[in-house]
Image: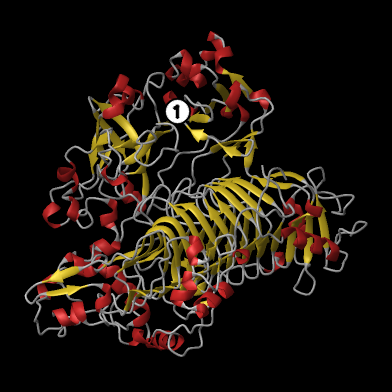
């Protein structure tokens, strides 16, 4: 393996042990014979699937090795497929199914460099320098788009590869983005292991804060830049309704999801629209300005035309009944591809600063840019931050490429470093399947393999048990590296979103997961109704450069019950690192740095919109260099029952964010050069009659689904499950990792404020400060058991070195006057502080994360506190960089 640095790995030792125990020690073990571990078979790139599969006469494909052991293994007689070094190019996923393919280890032989890939190699012989082609060659219709490179500067250093002639699928550019169901991403060009850049404008992504050079903006307000007005929205209110109503107007895709449609009188209209229906909704319309007017730059990006609008007849809700909802611009026919781009997109942030999206540039007329496909959210000038991508006329920087799919041309254009392709390993990632897919298996191990180049996820586990993925390298996949389970076809904001088929006791460890379009490991598993644990684990992994193509694709997804993300080294990504959607999860002993670098309103660890995500622990982690104004731990929209303790947060704007939830605790944490240890928001901020609360139907539905029996409602718990939940969180048997009991007796008293006579949740029309119908101030806004009251929270025993204290939110009502803060209901908000002036004064050694028993922290918080910290927190136990380990697998 070349250039591989990882940390805290035991992979080489595991391989050595396996070799000692297995068949690597001497002569061949013939297929069907039994070594110490059971039947063994060998595969090698130079083998033959007609061979017997011995060491001296191996099979050629991994699939043949799988089939050779099918049905001959068991828990007492596990088998091994030894995979010799070399490259294995897949045309289909390696499928392992059921008992027949259980109890088998697929392992790199003796630490040899085994590469399993879905990439098509593009050898030197197929490349041609554009400047070397004669007039007759350039007259080939397949090369007709080359005319858009219409200056010597653009043409210089560009090479072309005829994918169609080589039989290589050029793939498709689909619309993807936050809350759109993921589709395979566009093929990507990989050169010497590095993913190249789809031709874009502006170039680069390394702009400092306040520098607008890397992106196109509207007014730049949400990004702290002086926006040049490159792309702004004309007549947005006329086209989509006022901003304050975008979520309920019915005019944007987000307003066509179930949670936004509960106010409709006709219950038959309340279900979520299909993705096809939403993709046909009214797209943004841009007024072009700023840099795009220089040299009429935008006029190259799409043809000149006013598109025909297909009005499909649907209209907005209520007062927006005259607003067209599916005003779908039709494709432009007969594009002159020698002058105009044919498949350019705007990709980035369109309607929120935490959710990416993309729209196709369809055409332009005057200074108006027409788009195809809607933005998920109401498009806003202050949030706009995008690039134009897949634009051949912007192929002007080394490392950029473009695939011309127009009229089946299927030609790849590329500007290589140094104007040379020879001697480089060049591949096109066009494989749109998993590399390994395990379904219903038990006891399968993947070890020491390098997996790369898929347009979806690398390894998929469905209903698998006891899988071990150990010492693997997964890179250059467009979605997630490993998915344990799958998600329902919903969005994370809805009550019916969940993971299914996650199996249990699956482990991903000692692995290097990097350069991922999506996330690292999806850890689904467990049953929230019964609180049965999944016990799926990701540990001792390095996960780097992820979320490159999509937001909300973290290094660790924790969905379900009882899964763990621990001792991982996670770094360099534009968005969150861990998302928690479930119960009794562990996010412990991880090292996080340089994260959330291109997003706002986010955290390194994120959770939200559920009062029932109880029992989650985020502890003993290091958070360093958090981007923008984001937090280490962001508890959004009613998230409750979170425990954040014994973490070190360094070089960040903020530590924790409490957003209207209950029973969240942030205790015994150390903040070094952090602007504020935390902050909060309360539902009270929307004003006394501010009902329903934001996303109220969702958080109520999720609460009802597990903790309240509501006859006749779509989401309602059974009495048996309510009893099970209350027992689990009140009997003291469940514990956190430091031995503290996981106790939430208050859940038996929590309630949704409801109209006494009808049981309907309180709305603004029902509310009055002194109402006698159950919707009064005391019941809705002051009782600590009301779900709308942020009670029993704590931020206590904080060490603050070179930063600021907690910034509490405050809301006031009148008639009679009352003021509310978190400490209205909680007596441990910003209490027991230690504020040394320096690390030395604190007695904190950042090299070990230990405190001196004689420093200021020991004086203010006590020696017992220091001893407990030193016992629980150690850099030796944290996934971290800088440790060399024996190498397994290979970097492409």
Q: Residues within 10 Å of mark 1 (few under 14, many from 20)?
A: some
Q: Is residue 668 above or below residue 324?
A: below
Q: Is residue 265 visible?
A: no
Q: Residue 52, relative to residue 858: is it above or below?
A: above
> Which of the 4 quarters of the picture holds residue 680?
bottom left
Q: Report the quarter where the C terminus lies.
A: top right
Outermost residue toward the right in this view: 27
Q: Classify residue 478 as left or right of residue 722.
A: right
Q: What residue lies at 54% left-to-right and 79% top-to-bottom?
A: 738
Give percent across and percent down for residue 41: 82, 57
Q: Nearer the viewer, residue 820 or 193?
A: 820
Where is 99 relative to 769, above or below? above
Task: Using the image as rendered, state which of residue 353 and residue 523 is in the foreground.
Answer: 353
Q: Is residue 588 visible?
A: yes
Looking at the rendered image, the quarter that the N terminus falls into is: top right
Residue 710, percent from left and from top: 29, 82
Residue tagged 1: 406
Specify the quadrant of the image occupied by residue 803. Answer: bottom left
SS class, disc 1: helix
């Amino acid at each position: 393996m070349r250039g591989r640095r990882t940390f805290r790995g035991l992979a080489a030792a595991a391989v050595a042990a396996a070799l000692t125990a297995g068949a690597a020690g001497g002569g061949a073990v013939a297929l069907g014979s039994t070594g110490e571990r059971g039947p063994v078979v060998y595969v090698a790139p130079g083998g033959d699937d007609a061979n017997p599969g011995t060491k001296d006469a191996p099979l050629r494909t991994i699939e043949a090795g799988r089939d050779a052991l099918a049905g001959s293994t068991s828990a007492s007689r596990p088998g091994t497929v030894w995979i010799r070094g070399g490259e294995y190019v897949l045309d289909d996923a390696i499928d392992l199914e059921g008992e027949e393919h259980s109890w088998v280890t697929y392992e790199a032989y003796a630490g040899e460099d085994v590469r399993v890939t879905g990439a098509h190699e593009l050898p030197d012989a197929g490349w041609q320098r554009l400047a070397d082609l004669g007039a007759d060659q350039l007259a080939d219709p397949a090369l007709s788009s080359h005319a858009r490179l219409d200056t010597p500067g653009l043409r210089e250093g560009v090479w072309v590869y005829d994918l169609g002639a080589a039989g290589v699928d050029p793939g498709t550019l689909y619309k993807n983005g936050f809350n759109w169901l993921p589709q395979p991403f566009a093929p990507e060009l990989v050169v010497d292991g590095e993913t190249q850049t789809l031709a874009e404008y502006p170039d680069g992504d390394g702009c400092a804060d306040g520098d607008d050079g890397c992106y196109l903006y509207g007014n730049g307000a949400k990004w702290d830049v002086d926006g040049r007005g490159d792309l702004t929205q004309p007549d947005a209110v006329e086209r989509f309704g006022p901003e304050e109503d975008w979520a309920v107007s019915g005019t944007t895709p987000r307003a066509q999801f179930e949670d936004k449609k509960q106010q409709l009188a006709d219950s038959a209209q309340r279900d979520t629209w299909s993705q096809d229906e939403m993709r046909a909704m009214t797209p943004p319309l841009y007024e072009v300005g700023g840099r795009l007017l220089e040299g009429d730059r935008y006029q190259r990006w799409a043809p000149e035309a006013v598109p025909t609008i297909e009005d499909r007849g649907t209209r907005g809700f209520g007062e927006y009944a005259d607003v067209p909802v599916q005003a779908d611009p039709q494709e432009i026919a007969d594009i002159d591809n020698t002058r105009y781009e044919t498949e350019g997109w705007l990709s980035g942030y369109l309607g929120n600063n935490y959710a990416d999206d993309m729209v196709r540039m369809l055409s332009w007329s005057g200074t108006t840019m027409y788009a195809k496909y809607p933005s998920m959210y109401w498009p806003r000038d202050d949030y706009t931050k995008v690039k134009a991508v897949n634009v051949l006329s912007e192929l002007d920087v080394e490392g950029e490429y473009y695939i011309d799919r127009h009229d089946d041309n299927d030609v790849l254009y590329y500007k290589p470093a140094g104007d040379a392709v020879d001697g480089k390993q060049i591949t096109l990632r066009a494989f749109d399947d998993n590399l390994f897919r395990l379904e219903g298996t038990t006891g399968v191990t993947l070890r020491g393999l390098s997996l790369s180049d898929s347009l979806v996820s690398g390894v998929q586990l469905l209903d698998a048990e006891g899988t071990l993925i150990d010492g693997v390298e997964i890179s250059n996949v467009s979605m997630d590296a490993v998915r344990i389970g799958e998600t329902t076809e919903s969005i994370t904001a809805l009550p019916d979103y969940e993971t299914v088929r996650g199996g249990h006791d699956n482990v991903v460890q000692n692995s290097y997961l990097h350069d991922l379009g999506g996330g690292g490991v999806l850890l689904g598993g467990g049953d929230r109704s019964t609180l049965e644990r999944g016990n799926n684990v990701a540990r001792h992994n390095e996960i780097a450069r992820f979320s490159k193509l999509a937001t909300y694709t973290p290094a660790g997804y924790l969905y379900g019950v009882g899964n763990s993300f621990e001792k991982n080294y996670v770094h360099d990504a534009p968005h969150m690192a861990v998302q928690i959607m479930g119960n009794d999860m562990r996010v412990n002993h991880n090292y996080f740095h340089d994260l959330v670098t291109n997003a706002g309103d986010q955290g390194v660890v994120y959770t939200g919109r559920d009062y029932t995500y109880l029992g989650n622990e985020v502890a003993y982690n290091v958070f360093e260099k958090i981007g923008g104004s984001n937090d280490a731990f962001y508890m959004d929209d009613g998230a409750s029952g979170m425990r954040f303790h014994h973490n070190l947060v360094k070089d960040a704007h903020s530590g924790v964010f409490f957003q209207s939830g209950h029973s969240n605790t942030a205790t015994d944490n150390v903040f070094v050069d952090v602007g504020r240890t935390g902050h909060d928001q309360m539902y009270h901020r929307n004003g006394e009659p501010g009902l329903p609360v934001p996303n109220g139907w969702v958080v109520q539905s999720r609460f009802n689904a597990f903790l309240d029996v509501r006859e006749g409602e779509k989401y309602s718990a059974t009495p048996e499950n309510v009893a099970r939940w209350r027992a689990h969180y009140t009997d003291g048997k469940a514990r956190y990792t430091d031995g503290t009991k996981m106790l939430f007796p208050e859940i038996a008293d929590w309630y949704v404020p409801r109209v006494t006579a009808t049981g309907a949740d309180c709305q603004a029309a029902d509310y009055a400060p002194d109402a006698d119908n159950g919707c009064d101030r005391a019941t809705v806004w002051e009782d600590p058991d009301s779900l709308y009251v942020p009670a029993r929270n704590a931020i206590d025993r904080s060490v603050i070195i070179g930063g600021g204290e907690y910034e509490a939110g405050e809301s006031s009502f009148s008639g009679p006057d009352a003021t509310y803060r978190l400490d209205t209901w909680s007596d441990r908000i910003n209490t027991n502080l230690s504020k040394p002036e320096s690390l030395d004064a604190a007695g904190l050694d950042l090299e070990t994360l230990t405190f001196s028993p004689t420093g200021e922290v020991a004086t203010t918080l006590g020696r017992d506190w220091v001893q407990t910290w030193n016992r629980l927190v150690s850099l030796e136990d944290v996934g971290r960089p800088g440790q060399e380990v024996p190498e397994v697998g290979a970097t492409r």
